[in-house]
Image (tube, rainbow, N blue to C red):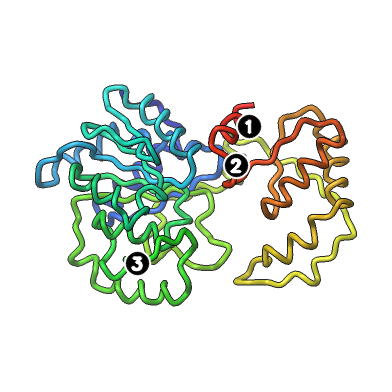
Amino acid sequence: MTPTLRPYQSDALNAICSALAAGQNRLLMQQPTGCGKTVCFAAMPQWPALRTWFAQQPGERTGAGMLVIAHREELLRQARDKIQAANPGLMVSIEQGESVANRYSDVVIASIQTLAARHFTRLKRLLARHMFRLVIVDECHHASASTYRTALVHLGFLPPAAASETEDMEAASFEDVAQMAEALNGWDAIAPQDRLLVGVTATPNRSDAVGLGCVFQSIVYSYALKQAIADGWLVPLRPWVIETNTSLDAVRISHGDFNQKDLAASVNTDRRNQLAVSAWQAHAAGKSSLAFTVDVAHAHALAEAFRRAGVVARAISGETPKDERREALAA
């Protein structure tokens, strides 16, 4: 059963269908955080125009027809739950670490780290069993990284020149992008057209200024944060600015963003962390809250500052053990 979508979600899917009809199959969709990007791509297997398009593609489909790639466990679990709810008749499996997708799955949701490990052994094994007609890259502002680009080469969306011998999760360099731009010249004329790649993100503009044009042909749909608020789907922002005497004059700028090490040295101080605690007590006491920090050390220091004030607080990061991170998020 096709889920009931909000108007902008339907508009996004219709825009994808229009781009497909115009001959594009590497598409980017932008929606603000909280607007249901996962719900949107979970509806794709049942979307009438997309079902018609896939049915028209030559060749037999065996096993999974949809692959979702993400970089965090929470995103994998969220995608599984939403896709299963929207498509109760499909088998949905996760490919991550010790979890291996059922070979008869209709949808596989995979960690990019798992796919890329040991020179993409797991991805190659999946491709030996499945033909993925629909590939979703969640949080696709990471897609210029060598791991994603190489995965997309194996999946038939990018030319072989985009592949990398490394398994680096960091973004591409400007030199990589220049080489990719050259490799893409003429690629669309010979690239397989029987499959669809959709990247979804809230932030298509990377802070390091490395563009996503080395992966996607166009931003096929964009829904602005202000418009989402005006339409009543998101609550208005209520900002408070807390003044400090912290100087950022010594923080270096790299590709238009603050140098992380310099920034951490400037802002991760006892005095400034205490100001953050005091501001929270004044404006948000008792509310479940998230604090975004410069780095892992800053997260632990700020959590400790809250605990000293008698507030239950925990720091989580990619370094946090999986079970502990899951418990903290649930709490």
The disc at residue 320 is: 2
Query: What secondary structure is found at the residue carrying circle 3?
Result: loop
Mark closer to the observer (1, 2): 2
Placement of the N terminus among the 4 image quadrants: top left
Q: Nearer the viewer, residue 170 or 257?
A: 170
Q: Image point 30% across, 48% down: which residue?
A: 122
Q: CA distance from mark 1 to mark 2?
A: 10 Å
The disc at residue 95 is: none
Q: CA distance from mark 2 to mark 3?
A: 28 Å
Q: Image point 18% across, 47% down: which residue?
A: 128
Q: Earlier in the sequence, mark 1 or mark 3?
A: 3
The disc at residue 328 is: 1
Q: Residues within 10 Å of mark 1 (few under 14, many from 20)?
A: some
Q: Is residue 18 left or right of residue 113?
A: left
* Residue hosting label 3: 165
Q: Where's residue 270, x and y in %?
A: 86, 51
Q: Is residue 77 above or below residue 208?
A: above
